[in-house]
Amino acid sequence: MTWTLDPSDFGESVEEELGKLRSDVALFLHRSIVLKTPVDTGRARSSNNVSYTQPNRSTAISDPAQTIAQGAATIASRSNRPYEVVWIFNPLPYIGKLEFGSSRQAPEGMYRVSIASVKARYGR
């Protein structure tokens, strides 16, 4: 029996695939959250930030495409670090109220519904 792949390369291959999967999940989740966040002024939707190591607590007002693009750029910048935690965080004090049904636009929330979509899509 011979190896088709050098065993020492196997770990690198697994880490690369894990990095791709983590990026795919983070992109899908962030996009879903942004698009499901109800809109009044747009502040809540565009304050769904993506970061690493610690939450990004900045707030902004931008269009959904720009918010999603910024998140995608952040995720892409660290795709080669599969074990790093990806934060998708919204620092606004009223985001919890929105998540638990204070808006008729998103009575089921944004985060819980999006996480359920990830579980359905990726099998967990």
Image (cartoon, grey):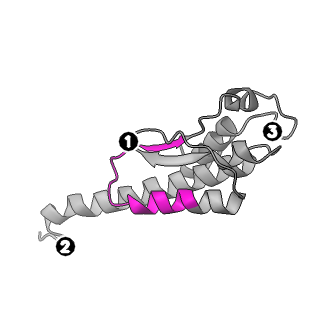
Q: Earlier in the sequence, mark 3 or mark 2?
A: 2
Horizontal and vertical percent for residue 14? Answer: 29, 58
Q: Quadrant of the N terminus?
A: bottom left
- Assign a secondary structure to mark 1: loop
Pick the front one: 24 or 64:
64
Do residues under tags 3 and 1 come within 8 Å of each other at their CB atoms? no
Mark in the foreground, 3 or 1? 1
Do residues under tags 3 and 2 come within 8 Å of each other at their CB atoms? no
Q: Quadrant of residue 92?
A: top right
Q: Residue at x 61, y 43 (%)?
A: 59
Q: Residue at x 44, y 63 (%)?
A: 76
Residue range of the region highlighted in magenta in the rendering = 70-88
Report the amino acid beneath label 3.
Answer: Ala
Q: Tell me if residue 79 is in the magenta stretch.
A: yes
Pick the front one: 76 or 1:
76
Q: Tell me if residue 72 is in the magenta stretch.
A: yes
List the residue tagged with mark 3: 106
Q: Is residue 84 left or right of residue 108?
A: left
List the residue tagged with mark 1: 53
- Assign a secondary structure to mark 2: loop
Q: Is residue 37 left or right of residue 114?
A: right
Q: Residue at x 65, y 43 (%)?
A: 114
List the residue tagged with mark 2: 4
Horizontal and vertical percent for residue 27? Answer: 55, 56
Report the amino acid beneath label 1.
Answer: Thr
Mark in the foreground, 3 or 2? 3
Report the amino acid beneath label 2.
Answer: Thr
**Distance between mark 2 and mark 1 Cα atoms:** 37 Å
